[in-house]
Image (cartoon, rainbow, N blue to C red):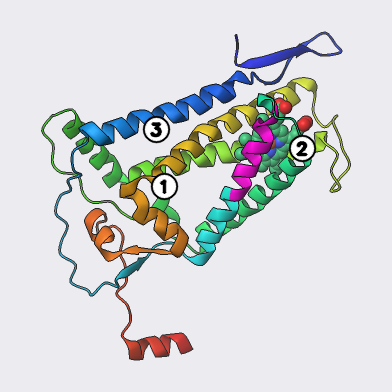
């Protein structure tokens, strides 16, 4: 039982046609399995998080720490909506719930593509581009956390920058799988009838098309696991402050001071009222 389904082309060549659909169940069970194991670990074994002391914050911080701008939140929720439509339209028919899914699928695919293009431009020119990539301190702290987890001596890890290492790694995994479905999906649109451009199934040979469908499917089932894990963490009680910031834009000062290092994620103190008036008028 392989992970790829094969067929014979008109020229007698064995060509891949798509992934074996049992991988949908593998991905779903992997996501749910992770969730159950993590929840048991957190309930019975995890100790309270410990961090090295960070210097006291002298500047007056606002009660609500701004975390996600309106544009960043709008991107996140548009992308999330497109992602759910894509997952349901792609995989429900494969598990026996039949409907005309292709048009809904590629339209959601274009919404996802447009939202990701927006995000890349926004993150490159208007956000702190490097905030989401692991840095040296993340790796050192991951090493310390691992040693402490194994009961070995190690210094306490520092508090996090804006994004903990786990979030950064998740972002990287979503980037790889997301770009894979988008790049392959845009080409796959030449295989179906759309109102946008003429169909051209001869753009590539059977082998190339097959590999493209396989990559689209592998990244697609990968996204099942990633989305399950993401939603699970979003609703975990200790992460609700982060989820709230994706809804309303900010998190409480208490949570910021508890988990984040003000040197690694610098938050400007609010302007005094009279300066604010000047700034608003700028
Ligand atoms: C969460 C993201 C996505 C998932 C899980 C996903 C999954 C799938 C799956 C499983 C198929 C069936 C392939 C087959 O029969 O071998 C498919 C087909 C297709 N996908 Fe996606 N996809 C995603 C994103 C996209 C995007 C971003 C686009 C376009 C920009 C797209 C365009 C298409 C098209 C046009 C087809 C139909 C191909 C055909 O019937 O010949 N998909 N997708």
Instruction: Find out whether the residues at labels 1 and 2 contact each other: C-beta distance under 8 Å.
Output: no
Q: The residue tagged with tag 3: helix, strand or loop?
A: helix
First in sequence, mark 3 or 1: give its number.
3
Question: Neighbour class for label 1 at 10 Å: few (<14), some, many (≥20)?
Answer: some
Q: Position of residue 271 (x, y in %)?
A: 33, 81
Q: Residue at x 52, y 22 (%)?
A: 26
Q: Residue at x 81, y 33 (%)?
A: 191
Residue 166 versus residue 15 in the image, above or below: below
Residue 204 versus residue 241 in the image, above or below: above
The N terminus - image quarter: top right
First in sequence, mark 1 or 2: give its number.
2
Mark 3 = which residue?
35
What is the quadrant of residue 104 in the picture? top right
Mark 3 or 2: in front is: 3
Range of residues picked out in magenta: 81-93
First in sequence, mark 3 or 2: give its number.
3
Total marks shown come to 3
Task: Tell which of 269 and 82 is nearer to you.
Answer: 82
Task: Tell which of 20 and 173 is nearer to you.
Answer: 20
Q: Position of residue 177 (x, y in %)?
A: 55, 36
Q: Position of residue 3 (x, y in %)?
A: 60, 16
Residue 117 versus residue 31 in the image, above or below: below
The reply to whether the residue tagged 2 has its Cβ within 8 angstroms of ligand 1 is: yes
| Magenta span main SS | helix
Q: The residue tagged with tag 2: helix, strand or loop?
A: helix
Q: CA distance from mark 3 to mark 2?
A: 31 Å
**Which numbered dot is residue 102?**
2
Task: Tell which of 205 and 49 is nearer to you.
Answer: 49
Mark 1 = which residue?
234
* Residue 133 visible to the viewer: no
Q: The residue tagged with tag 1: helix, strand or loop?
A: helix
């Amino acid at each position: 039982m392989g992970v790829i389904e094969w067929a014979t082309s008109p020229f007698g060549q064995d060509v891949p046609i798509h992934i074996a659909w049992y991988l949908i169940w593998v991905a779903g069970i992997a996501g749910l399995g992770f969730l159950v194991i993590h929840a048991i670990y957190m309930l019975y074994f995890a100790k309270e998080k410990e961090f090295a002391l960070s210097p006291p914050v002298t500047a007056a911080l606002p009660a609500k720490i701004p975390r996600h701008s309106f544009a960043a939140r709008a991107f996140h929720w548009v992308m999330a909506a497109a992602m759910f439509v894509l997952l349901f339209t792609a995989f429900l028919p494969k598990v026996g719930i039949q409907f005309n899914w292709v048009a809904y699928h590629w339209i959601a695919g274009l919404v996802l593509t447009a939202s990701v293009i927006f995000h890349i431009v926004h993150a490159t020119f208007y956000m702190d581009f490097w905030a989401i990539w692991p840095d040296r301190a993340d790796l050192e702290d991951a090493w310390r956390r691992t040693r402490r987890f194994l009961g070995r001596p190690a210094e306490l890890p520092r508090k996090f920058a804006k994004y903990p290492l786990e979030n950064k790694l998740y972002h990287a995994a979503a980037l790889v799988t997301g770009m894979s479905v988008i790049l392959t999906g845009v080409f796959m649109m030449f295989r179906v009838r759309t109102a946008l451009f003429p169909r051209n199934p001869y753009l590539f040979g059977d082998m190339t098309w097959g590999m493209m469908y396989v990559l689209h499917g592998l990244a697609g089932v990968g996204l099942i696991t990633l989305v399950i894990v993401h939603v699970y963490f979003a609703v975990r009680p200790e992460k609700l402050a982060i989820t709230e910031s994706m809804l309303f834009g900010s998190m409480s000062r208490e949570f910021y001071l508890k988990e984040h290092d003000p040197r690694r994620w610098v938050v400007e103190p609010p302007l005094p009222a009279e300066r604010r008036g000047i700034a608003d008028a700028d």
